[in-house]
């Protein structure tokens, strides 16, 4: 008794499908006639629309190393070449080994200063900073000088005395450096740099102070992102003075890559920070522009034990990048 009802249902369903198909085909024919009347090729219209969408998508360039590139002819224990924009490692050798980092520590010292101190603050140098060993700007006990000028002495001339004077200025007490060192270590922890640990503001503690080539490169990215520090590290030479002008300190950048009177000079180099101790060897963290892109190089503990070794090896690394890298594009 249910069979006739089933047949009527099937018949009704088929009629609906037939009407739908007729309407669909009618619309398709009308669209085709419209395209032909407007001179649009119906075969290519889909591709043209796709191309327009692709063209509207934003593009981004990134640096890539040629697959046939040889290893860079750089002789050091730890080597890194980094794309400063996205953090891509373009070349690396022992980049995560914990190592002593000498005066490259001063990048974190500088970042801590601009974070925690006012650059126009005037401080009085105590008798302790002038007695610090190693590279100095020759501060004098009793000298009054601004934090901003000490920062220049720290980064340009790699002044150990400037580093300790800054740490004292932060604590407000002669010989009291630990509060500033604590801030340095807090800074690297907050920026997810777990291997980096510092025990003095100048990088003299080779037994405990540690970082890695990878983390130093990311610290350099932070330095470059700060307009004040970026300007200082790019300065080949300048002079600073005590507030009364009686004491003048001539500063010359220890990074030979930005010194136009040396054979290591590279016009596209941006500076950053040199370093040396007997344990860390000759070190350099440097930046270099290629077009609108920036590379960061790290060369730690060079095989050659000379004062020019780190500049020589870094120069080779950047010139290798010029020859064996190129820009690629991808679309979002």
Image: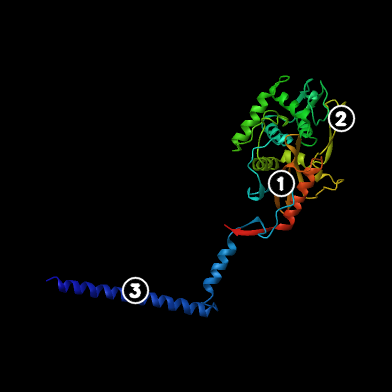
2 or 1: tag closer to the N-terminus: 2
Residue 269 visible in the current orientation:
no
Do the residues bearing badges 2 and 1 touch, measured as CB atoms within 8 Å?
Answer: no
Q: Which mark is residue 243?
A: none
- Image coords of residue 92 (percent x, y): 66, 48
Q: Which residue is mark 3?
A: 20
Q: Give the residue displayed 74% in from the left and 57% down from the top.
A: 323
Report the label total. 3
Foreground residue among 204 and 296: 204
Looking at the rendered image, the quarter that the N terminus falls into is bottom left
Of helix, strand and loop, which one carries label 3?
A: helix
Of labels 2 and 3, the one closer to you: 2
What distance separates the C-alpha of mark 2 from that of mark 3? Answer: 91 Å
- Image coords of residue 197 (percent x, y): 64, 32
- Image coords of residue 226 (percent x, y): 69, 40
Foreground residue among 139 and 228: 139
Q: Residues within 10 Å of mark 3 (few under 14, many from 20)?
A: few
Of helix, strand and loop, which one carries label 1?
A: strand
1 or 3: tag closer to the N-terminus: 3
Looking at the rendered image, the quarter that the C terminus falls into is bottom right
Q: Which residue is mark 2?
A: 248
Of labels 1 and 3, the one closer to you: 1
Tell me the colour scheme of the image.
rainbow
Indicate the quadrant where residue 212 lies: top right
Residue 288 visible in the current orientation:
yes
2 or 3: tag closer to the N-terminus: 3
Q: Residues within 10 Å of mark 2 (few under 14, many from 20)?
A: some
Foreground residue among 133 and 158: 133
Q: Which residue is mark 1?
A: 297
Q: Is residue 206 left or right of residue 42?
A: right
Do the residues bearing badges 2 and 3 touch, measured as CB atoms within 8 Å?
Answer: no
Q: Is residue 329 above or below residue 30?
A: above
């Amino acid at each position: 008794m249910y069979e006739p009802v089933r047949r009527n249902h099937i018949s009704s369903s088929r009629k609906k499908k037939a009407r739908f198909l007729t309407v669909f085909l009618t619309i398709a024919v009308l669209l085709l006639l419209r395209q032909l009347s407007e001179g649009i090729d119906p075969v290519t219209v889909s591709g043209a629309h796709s191309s327009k969408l692709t063209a509207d998508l934003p593009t981004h360039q990134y640096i890539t190393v040629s697959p046939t590139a040889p290893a860079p002819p750089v002789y050091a224990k730890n080597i890194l070449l980094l794309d400063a924009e996205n953090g891509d490692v373009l070349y690396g050798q022992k980049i995560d080994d914990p190592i002593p980092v000498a005066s490259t520590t001063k990048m974190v010292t500088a970042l801590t200063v601009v974070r925690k101190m006012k650059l126009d603050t005037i401080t009085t140098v105590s008798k302790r900073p002038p007695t610090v060993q190693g590279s100095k700007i020759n501060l004098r006990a009793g000298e009054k000088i601004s934090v901003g000028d000490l920062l220049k002495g720290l980064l340009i001339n790699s002044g150990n005395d400037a580093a300790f004077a800054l740490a004292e200025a932060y604590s407000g007490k002669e010989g009291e450096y630990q509060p500033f060192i604590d801030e340095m270590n807090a800074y690297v922890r907050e920026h997810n740099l777990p291997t980096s640990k510092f025990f003095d503001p100048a990088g003299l503690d080779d037994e405990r102070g540690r970082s890695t080539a990878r983390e130093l490169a990311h610290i350099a990215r932070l330095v470059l992102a700060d307009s004040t520090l970026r300007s200082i590290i790019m300065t080949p030479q300048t002079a600073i003075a005590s507030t009364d002008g009686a004491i003048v300190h001539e500063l010359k950048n220890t990074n030979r890559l930005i010194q136009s009177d040396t054979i290591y000079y590279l016009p596209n180099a941006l500076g950053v920070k040199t370093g040396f101790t007997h344990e860390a060897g000759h070190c350099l963290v440097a930046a270099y522009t290629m077009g609108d892109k920036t590379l960061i190089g790290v060369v730690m503990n060079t095989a050659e034990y000379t004062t020019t070794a780190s500049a020589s090896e870094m120069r080779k690394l950047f010139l290798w990048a010029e020859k064996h890298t190129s820009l690629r594009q991808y679309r979002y």
